[in-house]
Each structure stands twice: as C-alpha cells, then as structure tokens.
Amino acid sequence: MLLIDYLGAADIDYVRSVTRKVFTAAVARVFEPGVKFDWMLVLNGPGGIGKSTLINKLAGQWFSDSLQLSDTHDKTGAEKLQGFWIMEIGELSGMKRTEQDALKQFLSSQNDIYRASFGRRATPHLRQCIFIGTTNSERGYLRDTTGNRRFWPVKVDASDKKPWSITDEDISQTWAEAKVRYHAGETLQLPEELEKYAEQMQNEAMEVDDREGVIEAYLNKLLPNDWESKNEYARRDYLSSYYDNDSIFPKGNNPRTTVSAQEIWCEAFGKDKGNIRRTDSLEICVMLRRIKGWESKGKLQTTPLYGRQKIFEKVNSERTEPIIYKL
C-alpha cells in the first residue's frame, strides 16, 4: 500500500481502507463524473518527506496544487478543477472556522454550476476530481467542534522507500487495482466498523487547545468520599489547594469515573455555571475526546449540582483498532 510503503503510515486497517477508497473514488470520478464522494484524505507529517511529490507522481499531468482555501468561497474553486484529476489542498493548519465550513461544503458538491468567463449562462460541470490535503502541523489543524467526518486524517513520516523514486510500474499497478475494484462495485465509504476509528483520528487532528492540560490535571485528581455532597465553591477550594502540603482538606483517594462539560467549566476553569455557551460545551467535549481514557456514552445523567448533563466515563485508556480484514 502506497501510504505505508512510501510515506511511513501505520500498517493498520484504517490506513489501508482509506487508501483503497480514495484511489477507487478517483477512478470512479473518471467513469462516473459527479459520483458522490465527499471525503478528503489528509496527509499529516513533517515537511520534506514527499507528501506532495507522491500525489503529483500518481496524477501526472492531471495533478494541480493551485487550489487555495479562499477559492472555495466562490466559483474560482470550481473553475480551477477543470482538466485536473487530483487536487492537492496544501497546509491546512491555521484554517479559520469559516474557511473550514466553506471547504466542507465545497467537498460535498458533485456538480459545479457557474457561468464561465465570457460565457453567456451558467452551465453544469460534473466533478471529475478528488481532493487530498497535506499539512505539517504538529498541533492539529481541524477546528469544527460539531464534526469533521469529511476528513480522513492519516499520520505519515519518512520511509525507506522515497516518493520521488516510485516507479511507473508501481503507479500503473496502483491504478489498475483501483479500476478493478471500481468495476467490481466497491463502495466508496469506509466500513461501518472503521467509522469510529476515523472519528478518533479526526478528534486527534483537532487544533490543540492549551486548556486541555488543565482538564487532564483536573481529571487526575483523587476525590474525597464526600465529593458528591460538596457545592461548587467547596469543590473549587479542594481542587485549588490539592497540591498544598498545608491544605485544610484531607486528600481523597477515589479516582474520578465520570465527568461532564459543565463540571469542567465550573470546577476546572472556575467559571459561573450560568455563563456556559453551547460553543464552550462543544469545545470541552472535543478536548475530552482527545484525552485518552475518556469516552462519551451518549447519554444524559442527573448530577447533584448541575442537573441533567451529557456524561463522559473513564474507560480503558488503551485505544484498540478494530481488525476487520487485510486489504
């Protein structure tokens, strides 16, 4: 598999499946212009390892890296797609929220309708290309707290095989296999069993928020037996003096097993519970998903201080990837 062999990606089912789907989709858009495929592979790794080179060599004369994030706001983006097969969208780090929203909408389009320069009327242009993103960011690049399902992040690194040394035979074989899969009727979406793993990768690709360390420290503090009966101010006092040798509060010995965004807002950040906004809650939930060992169960639970809240639970900190099949 190219991403494993030439870009040092992990040899796991997620990477193999993403690679398989992306190349099959590229073939599908040649035979069926406009076929639905609204996902984008994102290669995240150090500069100079050949991310762009590999994409360029795979697409040959039908490669373009001219598309800018700002182009996706108007017909400029659609015009730049014409005549190309694989479009690289470079350096995704630093995307503004509005740019990411525009990019997501742009990726979902199957048919670009616009009036070309000097044209008399708007005409349809069925999509015949796919998109691959690249970034060197070590601190994340996704910003949408409501979901990033259209992005398939893959971490890459230097490999013994170099992208600039890939042979024409390997490239031809890659596309021949993708063509066989397309004609065999392979679907273009990830298997359901891998979607949860993709979501984990998307959470890990979120821009790092410095408050994440505050949350992790909060979660690691042991709680006293009477924790549930304490009000929010007593809880703050206990937490703020946790590492003081002369603290008036006896040190607890109970690991935390559940937490909500509201608890973190009030107790870890010291904010008033009446001031939390939906965006604040979403940001906290994103950070919780990034911290190993915590998982949302998708259920509401009544808490003593904060009423009904979405609860995260402490789980096995070892993330295991489902084994489905070898591709």
Image (tube, rainbow, N blue to C red):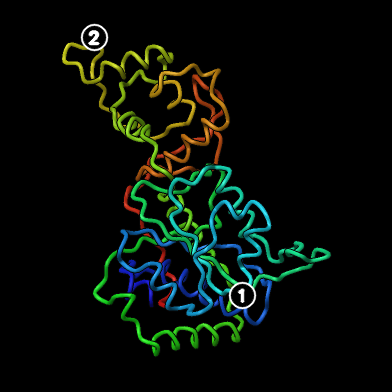
Q: Residue furthest left?
A: 245
Q: Residue furthest right?
A: 120
- Is disc 2 surrounded by few (<14), some (14 to 19) or many (20+) residues within 10 Å? few
In the figure, is residue 180 to the left or right of 90?
A: right
What residue is shown at x 54% (from left), y 27% (from top)?
302
Examine the rendered structure and indicate whether residue 77 appears above or below residue 203. below
Q: Quadrant of residue 81?
A: bottom right
What residue is shown at x 44% (from left), y 59% (from top)?
153
Can residue 193 be seen by looking at this rendering? no
**Amino acid type, mark 2:** Ile
Badge number at residue 248:
2
x and y, in percent, of residue 84 in the image: 58, 74
What residue is shown at x 43% (from left), y 13% (from top)?
231
Of labels 1 and 2, earlier in sequence is 1
Which element type, helix, strand or loop, lies under badge 1? loop
What residue is shown at x 54% (from left), y 87% (from top)?
180
**Residue of label 1:** 83
Tell me how far mark 1 sits from mark 2, CA to CA. Answer: 72 Å
